[in-house]
Image (cartoon, rainbow, N blue to C red):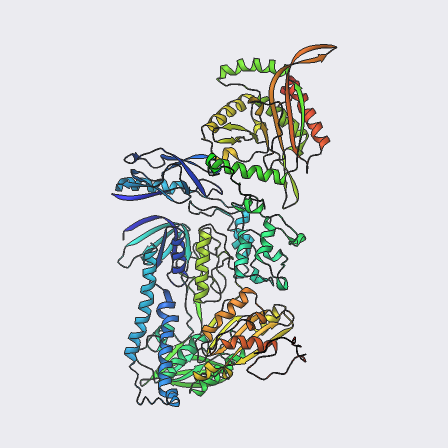
Amino acid sequence: MSQIEVTLPDVGEGVTEGEMVKWLVKVGDTVEADQPVAEVMTDKATVEVPTSQAGVVKELKVSEGDLVPIGKVMLILDSSGGAVKNSKVSEAKDAPQISNKPNNSVADGKLAATSASMTAANSAVKSAIVRPDNMTVKPLDVLPPAAESKVLATPSTRRLAREMAVDINQVQGSGLAGRVTREDLLSISSGGTENLAQATYSSPVPTSMPGKTKQALAIPKPAFQTFSAGQEERVALRGVRKKIAANMQMAKHVIPHFTLMDEANVTELVKFRENAKAVGEKYGVKITYLPFVMKALIATSKEFPMFNASIDDQAEEIVYKKYFNLGFAADTPNGLMVPVIHDADHKTILQLSSEITDLATRARDGKLKLEEMKGATITITNIGSVGGSYATPIINHPEVAILGMYKITDKPVMMNGKFKAQKMMNLTITADHRLIDGAVAANFLASFIKKLENPSELMLNMV
Amino acid sequence: MSVQVKDGYDVCIIGAGPGGYVAAIRSAQLGLKTCIIEREFLGGVCLNVGCIPSKAMISAAEFLHQAQHESSVMGIMIGNVRLDMKKLKGWKESVSQKMSGGVSQLLKGNKVEIIRGKATFKSPATLIVNIDDGEALEINAKNFVVATGSRPIEIPGFKFDEKTVLSSTGALDLEEVPKKLVVIGGGYIGLEIGGYLNKLGSEVTVLEANDHLLAGVVESDLVAVVEKKLKKEGVTIKFKAFAKSYETKAGKTFVKAEVEGKLESFECDKIIVTVGRKPNSDEMGLKNLGMAIDEKGFVMVDAKRRTNIPGIYAIGDIACQPMLAHKASHEGVLVAENIAGHNRAYDVKTVPAVIFTDPEIASAGMTEKECREAGYTNLKIGKFPFAANGKAVSLQSTDGFVKIIADETTNLVLGVHIVGPEASNLISEAALAIEMGATLEDIALTIHPHPTLGETMMEAAEATLGHAIHIIQKPLTKATPTVQPENTTRH
């Protein structure tokens, strides 16, 4: 019998720690390789953590509620020889083959030795580099060494620049004789560009750089002054809530929001959906209004591409996306989650409906995978299903728009000189004013409402 | 032959020299599952047949030399000093063993698996290691670091037999001091070994193909100090000398060489060939893997020390110049950190170089020529001699100087070149200054303790600025005395 230490594996990009929510095994249990042993809540999602090895649980090293850094030993297994052999195979299988993007190849860096055969050598490198499981692939590569230029900076500052993916050769130093200081670099990371020689700067600081976004926003962190300590409870801000807080702060800081409100007469849509509901039941699929709204949103965004876009602030470029990944806000016991339906423009109402049901259920259970919450191009919030007439939602950065749909109510509407009871739905479009003008948003919302009000036409135009 | 498969390694390092063992320790520190493969000695050439044993021999030769010559000046009459070369060899070996044992302990303490055997790549992810007893291991690792170093270059007509024709390895392991010795190659290894054997009693002749010693590495004013001292100690130096062949007649060995166009013959007991080292890139099946190797035999690497084969890194002598242990160790750390997912690159302003001649030579940064090639057209150059330093005088080691090269307008320190006592220990301050982007004033305004050899660095900075205290320099500007306020107390 030998002992095996099972550590908290890297669960995804940028995650450095997780909160132990629940043990799925207890001391004495026999576990198979790849069997989930614990639920761990990270700042992105709650994930089931498997053991890479088989054996008998000897000791749980972490208690529920503990904060566990990636790589920390979670539990200890006793393992017989046979089990170890078995798990070795699975370990080898699990090792991710991380394929680096071309910019992570030697091609960008200078080979120290010089030779005519270098070009051949470079092109041979653009294939996968295999790395151990616990490694993150940085989207950075070799920036030119400062040693080869006349840039003045201490070794530690040069290393910091490299870690920040800033080409120190392009930074104008504020120090003695133009030396680049640590502060010069930090000011770049907090959004300042005045130190950069603009024309030649070509290495953007990726916004997805783990741990850097918090530092990037110089947001004050005021302490809360206690009024009555005995009547207050302090709970650590962590996990999903911490991530929501950071994302909201970031979005509000970066994006100048504005919200436009209107209402749509969805009487036809209600009828259409009633019929569709019955059809859906035959397929065992619950048809809600959300997929219709999605289809109308996609059709409208095709007319107004700036709504399905992002701003690359570093590059000072607008990124128009030719794909439609729709996020929809879901209220869960853990807090707000935004699952994403990828390539929603290629899916039928039936497919969308079943996917929505599946994602929403798993969001509530905290079982969403990280990739199921990534990559949205535009988001819908359905807060109306809970309550409220109108809201001013916050855009899910780096998207540039969020559509709000609210509850359907019977309202008297003046038609042909008479009041008639109609099904009305309030709608809001919240947009990034840097990219989208008020009049454009008004046209967008009008076009969207027209589609929602005429479901037959929407269906006829559907891809 | 049976083959046992071992896998699950995050990183496998081949070669346990100053590059490899450092890479292994840092890898293990970063939580990577690490093994290291060594065919000969832990610590590599450096600890076993290079830097360390040669330093042991040099310190012994220096001790003997002082006892024989310099002690009497101080009034210490030692009398008949005798050398027991076998005992000295034993002591030298104990020094290497101590250091190599330390490496073993460090590796084990960091849970690095040590595998002894000869490695050959089967594929970019698989290594075959032949263990001495006919067994073989197949090692599968996610990353490999090639740190297999270099070996002495042979020249035609002088095949190493380690009996008459010695490489540096054989020269360091002599059981008796050769009466007459020919050193082919006046580079740093030849001068270090030739220098100490001369002090131990050999009659040494150095044959150098160039017209000066330490060709291409060291500025000529530094070399001149060493050359003068060598000649004073009785070493014969032949320039433009090309060794052709040797023959042994009636127990006597003669080296035939063309010196300045004329054929000459040099009688000797041993021949040491130190014409340089070449990377071991022709081994391990590296070429079969398709690894890019340049025409000088260096494995081609980028600033992250990646080779053209994904997952394989190379560091140290095999990767690129300069072939120095401390460069290899620096790369060992950075490559381990790269493998662990950090973003590191080889980005140093200088690799200091030290030569353990008498007196020592040490350099950091650029030579005057290199400064000009790098575009620094206006330079300030200053020197401070050890003869004006109290500690050097009391050590009876006053040969040499500290020279600083700085940019004329910014006073940025570009290069520091030292020839003199403990130059090797003094150069680190210069390396730090250059890496930090220090100016002459930064060094001059740093208080250096008295009385030390280190003061020469401060004085040299002052001298380069034009106003050293302990040598006479012309005043650069006319000083206006500061007017003291009336109520100032004077001490």
Residue A178 vs residue B336: left or right?
Answer: right
Q: Image point 60% across, 79% down: which residue?
A: B467
Q: Image point 64% across, 46% down: which residue?
A: A315
Q: Which residue extends farthest front?
A: B487
| Image: A73 above or below B83 | above
- Locate residue A132, reporting x and y percent: 42, 47
- Depth check, front residue: B108 or B253: B108
Count of numbered labels shown in the rendering: 0
User: Could one spot residue B414 in this view of the protein?
Assistant: yes
| Image: B448 above or below B399 | above
- Depth check, front residue: A114 or A241: A241
Q: Quadrant of residue B465?
A: bottom right
- Locate residue A330, reporting x and y percent: 52, 28
The N terminus of chain A is located in which quarter? top left
- Locate residue A342, reporting x and y percent: 54, 31
Q: Which residue extends farthest right?
A: A417
| Image: A336 above or below B21 | above
- Locate residue B310, reporting x and y percent: 46, 50
Residue A210 vs residue B76: left or right?
Answer: right
The C terminus of chain A is located in which quarter? top right
Q: Which residue extends farthest top?
A: A418
User: Could one spot residue B268 in this view of the protein?
Assistant: no
